[in-house]
Every structure is written in C-alpha cells, then in structure tokens.
Image (tube, rainbow, N blue to C red):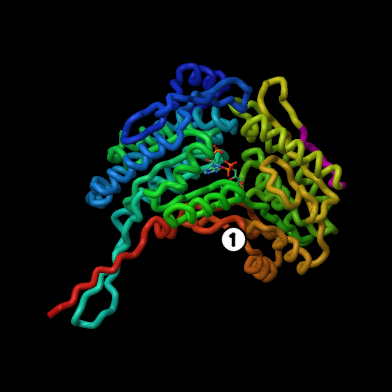
Amino acid sequence: MTKTYTRDYWESALSALTLEGRNFIGGDYRSAVSGETFTRIRPMDGKPGGTLARGTVADIDLAVASARAAFESGVWRKKDPLEKKKIMLKWAELIRAHGEELAMLETLDVGKPVLASLNVDVRLCADGIQFYGEMIDKMYDEIAPTGPSARALVRKVPLGVIGAITPWNYPMIIDAWKLGPSIAAGNSVVLKPAEQSSLSAIRLASLAVEAGLPAGVFNVVTGYGEEAGKPLALHMDVDMIAFTGSTEVGKLIMGYAAQSNVKRVALELGGKSPLVVFEDADLDAAASAAAWGCFYNSGETCHASTRLLVQRSVQDKLIEKIKAVTASDIALAHPFEPSAQIGALIEEAHMTKVLGMIAAGEKEGARRAFGAEQVLSETGGYYISPGVFVDMTNDMSLARQEIFGPVLAAIPFDTEEEALKLANDTIYGLAGAVFTKDMDRAHRFSEEIHAGTVWINIYDMSNFATPFGGFKQSGFGRDRSVHAIDKYCDYKTIWQQFG
Ligand code: NAP
C-alpha cells in the first residue's frame, strides 16, 4: 500500500531527527582537528540547520591517510568479488531502508521537495550503488596476443585514493555516481561534499560501514571549498579528483592537479542546454518538456533546458502552453507540502544572484512573459517562481550565463541551419534536445549538436546504462554506465616469458 505523506508527518519526523555533522574518517565520526564548526541555514525557512565540522588541511590529511591505509592493506581491493558485491548490494538496501531519513536530510540542506528527495534522489542513489555492486563479479581482465613463447596479462587495476568533490544540487545522486564505480573498482575515497549539502554524505558513509565496507574505504570531510576541497585536490597522495561543479572551479581543479602530483581529473561542469522546437513538433509535448526540463529542481540542474530555441511561427503558441503547464503542473510550495513539485533555492546569496541576473537581463531588453519573481518570502525561505523571457537573442546574458534558477530564455529562429548554429553557440556542451515530427531532421540535428546527451521529442530521460557528461567547457570523463568504471582504473601489463 502506498504511504500517504503529509506536512505534519515530515514536521514530526524532523523533530525526532538527530543531525550528525562531524566528518567520517576511518569508519568513525570525528570533529574537525581545529574543533571549528559552521552552521547550515535551511533554505526552506532561513532557520539554522545542521552544524558541520569545518574541515581543513589537517582533516584532509587524516582522511587521505585513512584511505591510503585501507587501499594498501588490500582489505577491500583484494576481497573476494562476490563478497564485495554483497556488501555494495547491502549498502544499496540500507539506503532504501533509511530513505525517509536521507530524504529529510537532503531537503533540510537543499530545499527541494521532500517527496522529490525520497522518490528521485534517494532512489537513484541506491540504484547507482546497486548498479556498480552488480558489476563487481562481472569484470574480466584480458590476455594480449603474444605468440606461444610468452603470456601477457592486461589487468585493469584500481588507481588508489580518489578525491571526490561534489555540488549541492543533487548531492546524493552525484555522490553515488562517484562512489559506485570508484569503490566497485577497488579504490578508497575521500569525499568533500558542497558546504551546503553535507548531511546526506555523512549518513551514506555510516550506512556503508554498517553494510560491511571496511573502515577507511569511504571517508567524508565537510567544509568550505577553499579550506577542504583545495587541499584535497592539491594532495600529493591522492591519485585522482572526480569533480562535479562549476566550470570556474573545474578549471582551478585542473590547475591544482598540475601544481601537485599530476593526478588525474574528471570534470562534470556547467551547462546552458538548448531545447529546439520546430514548427511541426507536438507542441504540447514540447511545452511540457521545456517547462519540466528548465524548472525541475528550481532550475538548479546542470543539464536544465535553459535555452528554448523555437521556430518563430510557433513561438507565441508555445510560450502560452509553457505558461499553462507551469501553472497547472509545477506547484511551488514549502518542501514538506505533498503538493510541492519545486521548492526553495539553495541559499539567500544564490537567490539574490539569480534575481540580479534577471534584472540585468531585463535591462538588456529581455521581456518577461511570466514569473521569475521572488515569492513566499513570508516563510523566511528563498523561493523564485518559474519564469520565461522572450524577445531574446543568443548574445544576451540570460542566454549565455548559467543562471541556476528557474529562468527560461526563449530565442526565435527561422531555419534549421540557424537553429543549429544557435544551439552550438555556447561554451557548454552538456545536453540538448530537438522536437520535430521529421525523423530525418531529428537524427541529422542530434548528430550535429555538440553535447554529451541529445534527446529527441523528450527531455531528461536516462538510466544508469547511459553515460552522462559533457563536451567543451562542460567537462570531460563520463559518470554512469559501465564506462564510468574505466576512469577509476588503469591497465597494468604482466608479461611472462616461457622457456
Ligand atoms: P561549485 O561552486 O563549483 O562547487 C562544487 C564543489 O567544489 C563544492 O564542493 C565546493 O565547495 C568545491 N569547491 C569550491 N571551490 C573550490 C576550490 N577552490 N577547490 C576545491 N574545491 C572547491 O559548484 P556548485 O555551486 O556546488 O554547483 C553548481 C555547479 O555544478 C553548476 O555549475 C552546475 O552546472 C554544476 N553541475 C554539473 C553537473 C554535471 O554532471 N555536469 C552536475 C551537477 C552540477 P563549497 O561548497 O564549499 O564551495
């Protein structure tokens, strides 16, 4: 039977919840070496949330030493694959079993509707750990062709210690995208979550140990990017940084790798994805995809469809339909309300930044069709209503910058050539979509959009079997799918000469 959740249910669950904000190192909670903490302000109402350890270089050193010791001991990487698989699957089960608690932690930190946290974020986090757990006893090595006088084993071996640095928009999902393949491959991990969203990461680590993951294989250090993330990326004993976040910080991470030990980096960065609608498209489907593609998670999505390229002849009709879908389907409310489809933005400073970008866009001539205003301010939280701007050109700031708020920029075009040029006229290359009934055009167009994922007549459909990541300044390296394992491994040749 499906459980019915009410706002009262979540309020009383919250009052019974203990918020653990210490680092998790070597299988145990540890306060920051300095003893310092910081307080997270809840985006849903502006009240104090969790108190987190303010990790610095000393905490990173401890966590990396713990991860290194676990790796060198072989306690995880040399374990029987079947045993490793059982532990990963048990971890996934524990995540599901603690779903309501994890959903609450996520919502307290990031302000998204708690039912979205439960039904999307927790589910996909558990599915991700399970996906890679199931791979563990199905990964084969190779024997290279050598002729009969020798045998060359080509072994795929883990790298060692992985530093994972993650953002705040889908914390648990993105953590699982890093943890699943890196741990399944036999590595140890030190995770530095975004300062805004650490609670779920700490709980994931304690559940991993409860599932049987040896102490030290998965460590969490909380804190600020400059104070905890930077020393992790500069650390001489970290073999790779798996980073998801802004392009700006991604560039710094590459620099830190070069300045230290030439560690590898994988970067999942920003986006400004085009959703292209031709006049022959199913406009109802396109309107729904454009609204959900841009406004879900309050627009705080790297691959959000923030640029709507629409054939001029259907622009007005499509905008009307987007307005109607937004009003009827995408309810903005307090995250504990069962009706909420979108909730608060991550923090006050971010809300102010988004409102500033909107104001600057209007000064440049962008015309507001609807929404994009601060709302629910009486709650003390940080909410902006979904909104669309029209009469836009692709060189306006609202069409070029990653806003990370519920703001859609509609840009008209006349021909297919023009649409393609506009679609690719961005520094990013994360995702895109094309809506048309002409399948030749759909395939021609999707081949030519420079993006890691292109959807045809739909937006944001995916599963774990498909790689995810970007071209151009959206980064490199892919999360998800069987291919994600590769970046956490390298090949080692063992040559044996006969006779
Ligand atoms: P961000 O500011 O780049 O931060 C990402 C992570 O880097 C956080 O943990 C942050 O810590 C840390 N950090 C900041 N400065 C650092 C430094 N100097 N050295 C090391 N670490 C540092 O990004 P965000 O605001 O959290 O997330 C939004 C961005 O992520 C958007 O650009 C979005 O497009 C991108 N994103 C991309 C994908 C993808 O798959 N391509 C997915 C989701 C999000 P603090 O929190 O303490 O600053």
**Of 116 and 156, which appears nearest the observer?**
156
Label 1 crowd bin: few (<14), some (14–19), many (20+), radius 10 Å = many
> How many numbered markers are drawn?
1
Tell whether 325 sits left or right of 182: right
Residue 93: which quarter of the image? top left
Is residue 362 visible in the rendered image? The answer is yes
Q: Dot 1 corresponds to which residue?
A: 471
- Residue 144, given in percent of the width and then of the height, sits at 29, 75
**Of 120 and 282, which appears nearest the observer?**
120
Residue drawn at (36%, 61%) of the image? 490
Residue drawn at (66%, 25%) of the image? 381
- Residue 3, given in percent of the width and then of the height, sits at 49, 28
Identify residue type, mark 1: Phe
**Of 154 and 258, which appears nearest the observer?**
258
Hey, which residue is sitting farthest front in the picture?
259
Is residue 131 visible in the rendered image? The answer is no
Residue drawn at (27%, 50%) of the image? 77
Tell whether 457 sits left or right of 37: right
Magenta stretch contains residue 295: no
Hey, which residue is sitting farthest left in the picture?
499
Residue 135: which quarter of the image? bottom left
State which region is magenta: 365-373
Magenta stretch contains residue 368: yes
385 lies above or below 159: above
Cβ of disc 1 within 8 Å of ligand 1?
Answer: no
**Of 32 and 327, which appears nearest the observer?**
32
- Residue 50, given in percent of the width and then of the height, sits at 50, 24
Q: Quadrant of ligand 1?
A: top right
- Residue 280, given in percent of the width and then of the height, sits at 76, 62
